[in-house]
Each structure stands twice: as C-alpha cells, then as structure tokens.
Amino acid sequence: MPGTAFHYHKLFLNDGLITSGAYKLTLEMFFQNFLNALQWGSFYALIALGYTLVYGVLLLINFAHGDIFMVGAYIGFFIASFFLGSYAFHLPFALSGNVIFVFTVIITMVLTAGVGVTIERVAYRPLRKKGAGRLYVVITALMCGLVLENGNLALLGASRKSFPDLIEKSIYTIGGVTFTNIKILVIVTTILVFLFLEAIVRKTKIGMAMRAISYDRVAVLLMGIPLDIVIVFTFILGSSLAALAGILFVTAYPVLEPYMGAMVGWKAFIAAVVGGIGEIRGAFVGGFILGFIEIYVAAVFPSTLRDLIAFAILLLLLSLKPTGIFGIARAQKI
Amino acid sequence: MAILELKNINHYFGGLHAVSDFSLKVEEGELIGLIGPNGAGKTTIFNLVSGFYKPTEGEIGFCGKSISGLKPHEVTGLGIARTFQNIRLWNSMTVLENLCISQHYRLGYGFVDSVLQTRRYVDKEKEVIKSAREFLEILDLKECENEYPKNLPYGLQRRLEIGRALTIRPRLLLLDEPAAGMTAGDIEQLIKLVKWIREKFKLTILLIEHQMKVVMGLCEKICVLDFGEIIAEGIPSEIKKNPRVIKAYLGEEVTVNA
Amino acid sequence: MKRYLPFILYGILCFVVIAGARSGLIDTYQQLIIMFIGINIILCSSLNLINGYMGEFSCGHAGFMAVGAYVTSILNVWLFTSSQIFGEPVLSPVAAVFLFPVTLIVGGIAAALAGLLVAIPSVRTRGDYLAIITLAVNYIVKSSIENIQVIGGARGFMGMGKVVDSMTGVLNLPWVMIWIFAFTAFCIWVLNHFVNSTYGKGIIAIRDDEIAAEIMSVDTNRMKIVAFTLSSGMAGVAGGLFAHVLGYINPGSFTIMKSTEIMVMVYLGGMGSLSGSVLSAVSFTLLMEILRPLQVYKWVLIPLLLIILMLFRPEGIMGNRELTDVFPKLRRFFPSKEL
C-alpha cells in the first residue's frame, strides 16, 4: 500500500520549538516542553473526542476519523486560499488575517461535518439498518478512511501544500520559556471545547439522549428518542471538532499531505481508549497523556524511540486499568 | 454430607449489597426452589455458585471441598451445571455441536491431537458425539440434530439448554427460570422432564422460578429471598402461608377503617 | 483413496506450476503473483482464526509477520551467506536447501512467542481492547526494528537473495515457491482440522457466547491463547516466506496498512470460513494486480468496491459457510474422517 509515508509526525520535531536528543533537562526546558506537550496533547485530545463521541453512541470505532481530520485541514486550506484571493475570485474588501481565520474555521467546521454525516449516511447507516455485526462496520470505516486518503492523493497529487499564515505569529518569552500566541490559542480552544462538550452532554436534551443510547439502544427508540437524529448530531460534533483540530494543526505546523491524518488518528484513538473510550473526560485526559509522553520522551531519548516508548507506556497503562482511566467496566448480565 | 454448602455469603456490587449473609445447605438428591421478587439476588447466587462471581465474603463448598475462587469452567468440571435465564445457546453451531462442545472438560485430548487426528482424538471424538446423540434421544430432539438452535421453537430451545447442561454429567443442576416465557402446555412438559431427569441421573437440583405452578409442583423445599436475604425456608405448603413471604410478594396489608 | 484426493489434486497443481516455472512457461512476474497468493492465503486464513472464528478483533497481524520475517531472514543470512553483518557463513550454503523450512518454522515459533506475549495479558480484554493492544504491538514491533541498527534499522535488511541463490545452486528449482506451496497446504490442513474438532470449536463457542462457553466447561482463556499463538505463528511463517520472495525487507513493509490489507481479505472472504479465506486471498491478490495500472486510483477503487460489497453482502463472499455447505457435492472430495 502507498501508505508508508508516515514520516509526517517527524516534521514537527525539527521545527526548532521542540528540542530533541540528549541534552540537560533544565527547569526551563521542562516548562518549555510542558507547553509544547499541552499543545501537542491538544491535537490528540480534539481528535480523540471525535472517536469517543461516536463510540459512546454507536459502540463503533470510527477508523475514518483520522482522515476526517485530514479532510478538515484540506478544506481549511482551500477556504483560506479562497479568502486570500488565491483563486480567480477576489473579495471586494480586504479582510485581516484574524477575521479570515475565524471565517475559515467556521466554514470548514460546517463543511467537514457534512463530510462526516455523508459517510455515516452512505456507509454506516445502511449496515446498521441491516443489523450487520460491529466488526463489519469497523471494516467499512477503515475503507472510508482509505478512500479519503487515497482519493485526496489521486485528486491533488502527492505534493505537500503549505497552509497560509493567517494569524500573525508573536513570540513571548517569560522566564526563559518561549511560547507563541498560536500555542496559547490551541490550548485555550481545546479547553473551551472540552467544557462546551461536557455541558452539552450533561445538560442538554440531545446530550442526554446520546448517553442513553450507549446504554440501551432499543429502549431509547421506545422512549421516543429519534435515534438517527442523535447519531447524525454525534457525527456533526465529532467531525467538526476534527476539522477544528485540523485547522489548528496546520496553523501550528503548516504542512498538508494526504496521510497526515492516518498516524495521528490511530494514536488519538489509542489515547481515547487509554482515557476510557466513550468518556469525554477520558478522551481529553488520554490525549494530553499521549502528548506529554511523546514530547518528554522525544526530549530525553533519541526521537526514533518516541513511538516505541509511547506505545509501551500506553500498553502498560491499559494493562493496569483495562477499562481506561475513566472507563467503567459494565457488568455483564447473565 | 451436604452436596452444596453456602456459608455466610455476602456479595456486593459496588455499594449494592446483593446477597447478605446467605447460608444454604443442599443435601444429595434434594430439589430446592429459590424464589423471591425480581432483584432479590437469586441469579446472583447462581453466579456465585457457578464461579462467575467470586463472593466478597463467605465460603462455598461442593462435596466437602471449597470451590470459591475457582474459574467457572473448573467448577463445571467438578459437576455443577446450569442453564440461563435468557437462553444462551451457540447459535452458529448445530444442535449436535452444541451438545459436544459442552463436554469440553472431558475431551482428554489437546491441540496436537486435534491437528494430527490421532487415535486418541478419534476415540474421544466418537465418544463425545455418541454421548451427545444419546442425550438428543433422551430429550426427544433427535430430528433436530443438524438444525441450528435459533430455528427451534422456544420450548425446544429451553429443553436443549437443559440437555446441554446434562452433557456435563452434573451432580448438581442449577435451573435459572426454566419456565420463563413458556406456554401452559410447555410448562406441563417441563415439570415432567425435570422430574424424569432427576430420577434418571440422580440429580440434586436448585431451581429459580417465578411460575408458582412449577415451584409448587416440583420442589420439596423452598427458600424465599428478598433483598439478598433469606426471609423464609420450608416446605411449599408452609411457604404459601408465611406472612413475610406474602408481604414480600404482595406488599403490606393495609387495614382500612370505615 | 478419496480422502487423499484433495492432496493429490493439489500436488498435481503444484507440480504443474513448478514445472511451468522451471521451463519458463510461467514467467517471473506470474511466479511472483502465484507466490503472493500463497502467502496471502496463509495470512488471511490465520487471521480468520482470530477475527472470524473467535470473533475477536486483532488488527496487528503484520507485526507478527514482521517478527517471523526478520527472524527467518537473519537466521538464513547468518547461517548460509557471507554478509557484512555476520561475516562468513556458519554452515555450508548447500545446507540451506535442507534447513530452509527449519528456519521458517523457527521464525514461526518466534512470532508465536510474540503472540503468546500479547495473548497472556489480553485474555481478560475483549473486542475493542484487543484491537488497541494488537494495534500498539504492531507499532511497537515496527518501531523496535527501526531502532535496531545492526539489522539495518529503517533502511531494511537484505541478503536473502543469496540464500535463495545458494539453494538454486544445489538444484535448480524454484525453492521458495515450493515451500510456499508446502506451507500453504500445511496451514490450511492444520486450521481445518483444528476448527473442525470439538476442541477447536470451543473458540467458535467463545464467539457465539463467551459466558455460556466458560460456564459450559470451555477453558476460554486457554482457547484464546492457543488460537492467538497459532495464528501469530502462521503469520510468522508467512513473513519468512515473504522476505525470501522479495529478498529484501524493511519495517515499512509491516505497517498497519499491511494489517489492514489482511483484515480486508478476511472480511471479503467471510468470517469463519476457511474456503472463503482461500477464495478471497486468491481473488484479492489477482484484483490488486489487475488494477495495478490504475496506480493511486487503485486504492480509491478497492475500498469503494469493498464498501459497496459490504452494503449488499455484509457477511463477505462466503459468510461463515464453507464451499462444501454451498455445494454439498464437493463433500465427496472432502470427506471428514469417519466418526
């Protein structure tokens, strides 16, 4: 398969912000990496949220989700280029970068949500209606991911695209720790998203319906909850968050390529499981744990060992608590 | 000697005290009914006996040996078989295969034998199939040998499940609501069947049931549970009159003063 | 006599193909495809044991394949060739002819041990958690190999071509192909006997109802470990063969993508159907070759085809039936041992 180009994640190691290799772990470096880890974990957390939402409702591992993240980044790229006048169309008035950024985010989230819902509608729902086994749906999800990846490769070619600088980067230094406004933006957005989602799931009617479905899908139908609407809503939420993650990601590391979602997606999925899949807090915490492990491992050891150690630690965490950090073992009734 | 002895069993699910200080002695050959309102902890006791749960406190003895802490398949191997409240047959395999797989504990051959189809494999496999066929004959299920369980009528599925438990050659049989969802005709048959297998295989039986007809028609001794506690024990005619039992089932009597 | 008919037919087929390869009637490209079909049959049917028969979700089969591939290749290069890494051959290169299947089996055992390592902690977990564990193991294996510089790290490992050369030097036959034929038949034979024995049907009982299986005296933990070890061992053998077909391996050949490919074959054929696995391995390998001119569009088309297939026939080509169930007449040729 052509998907051996998983070199993407190595890119960010060389962008100068993250120092890898052996060096003395000073306190400054510790805090520097702390911020980096928060940012890196934010991406994982945002994507893991999408996995967890869908899993919580459908008990489906939506393996296409990583690629939805990629699609989000690309849609964002085209929207941003459109506003910047890279195509024949020019806006009659000039907009500042920040305004364009906001527009890009909103439009991209809407469009990507459309992609997610389309996949659900075309590929998953018919299978669900037929009562096909869960594993078949998972395979379909994998195939949808491949279609997105390779469809992108076929349509746009293998060349990388670079995301335009919409937000002017400003660098601050406090006590030897350097950070950018983008980094702050990423971290704050993620925390806001988390609070927002928790509120939706706990306080709104549709959120409660989402939680109810994962417990008993038949009873939920009998209680007059429109199953399909709740599922579509879940996909809207998950996909738009993946789009948000995509745009934030390319704002921080402005390179786009078709396989950018695959590796990050798999990892975010594992993060969601470590946190306890189906749990919003779990995805959030799992994402940050993975971010911290990766950044600190890369800071202390050679970066080639990063995946190895990260996955080993995750496996260890899982074997200590098989249901994940916030997951609850559901008693099997006999 | 008691065949099954539960001593001061306590079991918790998180904060829920599902079984509290439960003690029961079952003598060889007895048929004891376990009744009580829904959620009283009856099935939990079955799960504790069959090793699916490990009791939080207390001791379970089978034929004088402690079995608490054993895995379910080990408990089964010692001679305790059970059926399930909602039928749990292996639906992608035929009726005959269902009755063969339940003899797993006494197969006596392993992976290598099965691949090389050694003498031992052939002999054992023959034995297992022969005994499965015998049970089909006994249970009057012979015509369904190659049928899939999900295609059988409900009553036959129940009977097949009892048959599958019998292939274990148990000394103690736990029946979890065998009459649930059955028609009156089926129930008559079931009562006959249970009486008959009890004689034939010299079984000790523990029975959970809500259908009073079955309980009263079969059990010599009844044990009534409510909120995980035994509230009454005795012969059917006594139990029927016991005020605590009536209270548990029908609620408190209210005197209305005119 | 009839009992041996399938073996005789298969023997004749192998003989014809080998003779064709030897005489040049079947060109190198066609030979390559035939060999990949064999390897894919092993991979697909062995994964079917876990994902189909047992109903678990293992998605790191390529990881075990990698273990087998590297162990076999290193052994062969060390024993039979002079290489930069290991220096002079330990044994006479001629011995490769006899010891090649042994090294393949050693590779299989190594992979089986790796499988055992994964299986023991994961018997308690089911379904989705096994998916994560195997997924992570796939990454860990790949990443470990990348970090062992002695065996080439990310650059890969080569020298297996010389091993094959020294075998053909003794007797000019397509040795790798012969062993692929042999091991493909062996794996199908083992799996077929296993899943048709009452012992092996214990794993189908796990799929249908694990609780009932455990309570009805099936030692579910043990069965899971047996199945997992067997399956990963076979993947290891397939890996060893794969390495010698290509003559060169690198960690990039054993990614999640490879695992996905194997999973796709399993689902295409039907979960819990050995003949389905064989059919789908053959048709999938051929389909990949037919669609090769499409280049990158191939990987759009194939998943699309699969999605459409899922919509119309979600249980795969064969479902969980065997060819003998669909065409009962075939049973004449595949009689089970008289019981």
Image (spheres, rainbow, N blue to C red):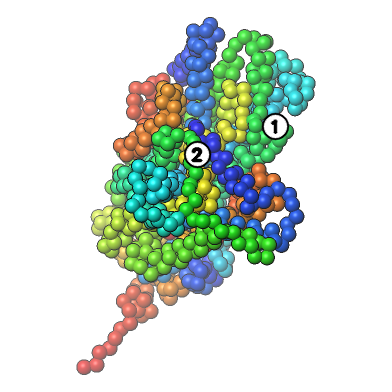
Nearer to me, A215 or A107: A107
Q: Position of residue A257 (x, y in %)?
A: 49, 41
**In the image, what residue type sits under mark 2?**
Arg
At 68% across and 60% down in the image, what residue appears?
Answer: A30
Q: Mark 1 lies on which chain?
A: C
Nearer to me, C43 or B12: C43
- Tell me the quadrant of the picture where the C terminus of chain A can be found: bottom left
Residue on which disc 1 sits? C151
User: Is B88 rendered above or below residue A146?
Assistant: below
In the picture provided, is C333 more to the left or to the right than B3? left
* Cα separation between marks 1 and 2: 32 Å
Q: Where is residue A333 in the image (x, y as percent from the top left)?
A: 43, 59
Q: Which chain carries label 2?
A: A
Secondary structure beneath disc 2?
A: loop
Label 2: few (<14), some or many (≥20) within 10 Å?
A: few
Residue on which disc 2 sits? A160
State whether discs 1 and 2 lie on one chain: no
Secondary structure beneath disc 1?
A: helix
Please identify, in this view, whether the residue under mark 1 or under mark 2 is nearer the observer: 2
**In the image, what residue type sits under mark 1?**
Ile
- Residue C127 appears in the picture as rendered: no
- Residue A22 appears in the picture as rendered: yes
In the picture provided, is C173 more to the left or to the right than B237? right
